[in-house]
Image: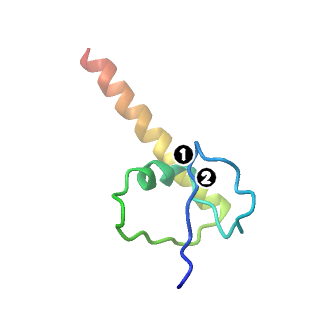
Amino acid sequence: MPQKPIVLLQDAVTGGGYATVGTVISADRGLLAQRQTHKSVYFENVDVDEAIAARNERDERLEEIRAEIEAAD
């Protein structure tokens, strides 16, 4: 039986006993957490600078959304 990777999300225990082969960048964890069960997931390599840029873009977009919501009130 082929082995399949698992992803431990933010509320999981530490990876003790499991080989860590990668890390899901913080900008993508929410997307992964919302993925439907048994749907395919594809991973791609990114470097630290790309991960930080993705997080900054996500944070900027969230700030824009917050500002729009506050302006609507």
Q: For the view shown, which residue lies furthest in the front direction?
A: 1
Is the residue 55 above or below the residue 45 in the image? above
Q: Residues within 10 Å of mark 1 (few under 14, many from 20)?
A: few
Foreground of the two, 16 or 61:
16
Residue at which label 1 appears? 56
The x, y position of residue 72, in whole percent, is 24, 19
Is the residue 37 above or below the residue 45 in the image? above
The x, y position of residue 21, in whole percent, is 67, 70
Horizontal relation, residue 14 to residue 2: left or right: right
Q: Residues within 10 Å of mark 2 (few under 14, many from 20)?
A: some
C-alpha distance separating marks 2 and 1: 6 Å
- Residue at disc 2, secondary structure: helix
Q: Residue at x 55, y 64 (%)?
A: 6
Q: For the view shown, which residue lies furthest in the left direction?
A: 72
Q: Residue at x 58, y 72 (%)?
A: 45
Q: Residue at x 58, y 55 (%)?
A: 8
> What's under tag 1, amino acid-wise?
Asn
Q: Are marks 2 and 1 in contact (CB under 8 Å)?
A: yes
Per the rendering, the mark at residue 52 is 2
Q: For the view shown, which residue lies furthest in the right direction?
A: 16
